[in-house]
Image: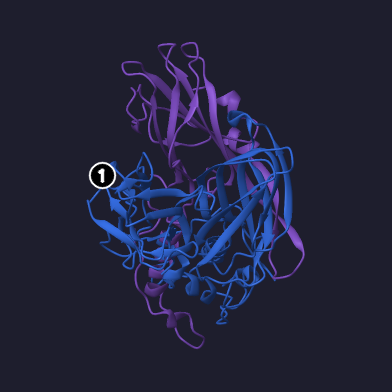
């Protein structure tokens, strides 16, 4: 849900921010609406991964045995006032290698080093594709297109990174919430290879 | 300097700004925090994008990305998903960084290095990297990303637009200076360029005619899948916005021309990158001329997508009387 009052940017004269110019209550309320709307639209596209000529494959597994396909990140997440992060909208493009057989994909967001322990869970930081055949396509996700870590998972993501605040100046440090995104796959029939054709994972302000 | 960029965005209460009521420090301070957060947060110039290339021993590959930076970015961090062993440099500072990673795609962990910006600005530029292998090693590049690192604090100037939070505290006067009081946030909140520039979709391969995507005749699709895409919503009533589409191309001979076409799967509208004759001497960026119209965010939807569905771009290439080489695609949102 938008945090702004109007859910759009209202054109205003930038001269209201000039010195010696009065600013009214109404003007500043419009200005704050703009600030909140800009912040709502401060989402970052994290992953837009589509290989040009191929797919990434993991060989057939025992049914339900998950294997990691690829790792993305680490990403410095956009954090909300309440300590949650902007949810991540995810799509997976994939298929199996055989007609009639089905495979499944999971996508997970977690702290670096924690993805493999949470990908098998049922938390809100994991989403799974519906069963798919051998035609590559952007897949429906059986438990939703948004993934988001809970507070304990976010706590694991706290770290500091080097930053620079002055041109040519010294390096300092900033606190960030840093997470990885991984895609895993498994076979349901036990004979099909799992093929990954694309991954989309973008922040969204969310409802 | 006290234009601190806090790790979390704030959420000032607009209901507290009503005529006849005093606006308290508890409202002004979050406004300044929000303003500083918008200007100083992490900004993605290249999302994690496919760069598949196998580099033989004692060889190298060059990858090119056309990015639109933001003037607040003073440190950029590259993330490279690469298997094998070798070294990488950004052509921005030409500093080499060694890497050694697993050769198993599923087990490799992204490698990161940073570059310090020497001339901040917001003009689009060719951000390029070179990855080299050593005498007896090979490497495979799987993905690349580029981020403008967040800031801990902003400058009190007309580049960073930081707001000094010391001027927002209890019993301080309502200053009219540019980076203080209510005027600091107002300068950020009234300027549409505060919707920062960001990368939406990228792809690159080694910029050599022997390794780039090539097409003779066509049209031939460059990717087996379309690329989901969306842009920020700006103004009242907007359902679409603009994105820039560019291609890094070269032709095989002086008389060869070609096109790279981006088709919006939501509308069927096509946008053409024209590659004129005489483009055979080296790779260069060409754009669509007119900026493609793309669906913008819908805040009434949980996914931010209008009616829950995304626009997607399909890319195809065509050549006439020779071969067209494509070594990069760049799609980015440019701050107004």
> Is the image coloured rainbow, by chain, by secondary structure, or in one colour?
by chain
Image hue for chain A:
purple
In the image, is B145 to the left or to the right of A174? left
Quadrant housing the C terminus of chain A? top left
Which secondary structure lies at badge 1? helix
Q: In the figure, B108 relative to A25: above or below?
A: above
Which image quadrant for residue B227? Answer: top left
In the image, is B79 to the left or to the right of B225? right
Q: In the figure, A134 relative to B289: above or below?
A: above
Q: Position of residue B231 (x, y in %)?
A: 37, 56
Name the residue at 37% across, 76% down.
Answer: A12
Chain identity for the colour blue used in the image? B
Q: Which residue is mark 1?
A: B307
Question: Subunit of mark 1?
Answer: B
Name the residue at 56% across, 61% down.
Answer: B127
Name the residue at 52% across, 61% down.
Answer: B38
Q: Position of residue B17 (x, y in %)?
A: 42, 66
Q: In the figure, B120 relative to B132: above or below?
A: below
């Amino acid at each position: 849900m938008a945090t702004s009052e109007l859910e759009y940017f209202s054109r205003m004269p930038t001269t209201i921010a000039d010195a010696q110019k009065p600013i009214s209550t109404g003007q500043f309320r419009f200005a704050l609406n703009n600030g909140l709307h800009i912040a709502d639209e401060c989402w970052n596209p994290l992953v837009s991964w589509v290989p040009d000529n191929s797919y990434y494959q993991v060989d057939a597994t025992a049914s339900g045995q998950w294997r990691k396909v690829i790792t993305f990140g680490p990403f410095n997440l956009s954090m909300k006032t309440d300590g949650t992060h902007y949810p991540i909208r995810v799509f997976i493009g994939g298929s199996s290698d055989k007609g009639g057989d089905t495979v499944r994909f999971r996508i997970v967001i977690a702290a670096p080093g924690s993805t493999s322990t949470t990908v098998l869970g049922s938390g809100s930081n994991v989403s799974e594709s519906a069963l798919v055949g051998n035609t590559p396509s952007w897949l429906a996700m059986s438990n939703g297109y948004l993934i988001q870590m809970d507070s304990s998972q976010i706590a694991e993501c706290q770290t500091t990174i080097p930053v620079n605040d002055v041109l040519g100046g010294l390096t300092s440090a900033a606190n960030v919430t840093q997470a990885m995104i991984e895609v895993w796959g498994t076979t349901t029939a036990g004979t099909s290879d799992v093929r990954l054709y694309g991954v989309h994972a973008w922040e969204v302000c969310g409802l | 300097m006290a234009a601190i960029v806090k790790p979390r965005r704030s959420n000032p209460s607009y209901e507290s700004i009503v005529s006849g009521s005093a606006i308290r420090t508890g409202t002004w301070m979050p406004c300044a925090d929000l303003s500083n957060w918008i200007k100083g947060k992490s900004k993605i110039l290249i999302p994690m994008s496919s760069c598949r290339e196998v580099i033989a021993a004692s060889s190298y590959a060059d990858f090119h990305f056309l990015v639109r930076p933001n003037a607040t970015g003073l440190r950029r961090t590259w993330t490279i998903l690469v298997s094998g062993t070798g070294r990488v440099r950004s052509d921005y500072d030409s500093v080499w960084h060694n890497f050694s990673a697993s050769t198993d795609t599923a087990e490799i962990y992204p490698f990161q290095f940073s570059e310090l910006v020497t001339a901040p600005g917001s003009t689009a530029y060719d951000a390029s990297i070179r990855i080299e292998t050593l005498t007896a090693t090979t490497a495979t590049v799987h993905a690349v990303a580029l981020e403008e690192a967040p800031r801990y604090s902003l400058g009190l100037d007309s580049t960073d637009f930081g707001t000094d939070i010391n001027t927002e505290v209890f019993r301080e006067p309502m200053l009219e200076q540019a980076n203080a009081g209510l005027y600091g946030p107002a300068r950020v909140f009234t300027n549409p360029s505060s919707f920062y520039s960001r990368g939406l979709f990228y792809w690159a391969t080694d910029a050599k005619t022997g390794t780039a995507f090539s097409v003779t005749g066509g049209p031939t699709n460059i990717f087996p899948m379309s690329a989901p895409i969306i842009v920020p919503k700006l103004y009242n009533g907007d359902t679409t916005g603009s994105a820039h589409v560019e291609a890094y191309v070269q032709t095989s001979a002086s008389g060869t021309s070609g096109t790279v076409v981006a088709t919006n799967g939501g509308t069927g509208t096509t946008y053409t990158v024209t590659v004129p004759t005489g483009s055979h001497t080296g790779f260069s960026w060409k754009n669509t001329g007119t900026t493609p119209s793309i669906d913008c965010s819908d805040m009434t939807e949980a996914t931010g997508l209008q009616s829950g569905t995304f626009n997607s771009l399909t890319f195809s290439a065509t050549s006439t009387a020779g071969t067209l080489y494509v070594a990069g695609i760049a799609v980015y949102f440019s701050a107004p």
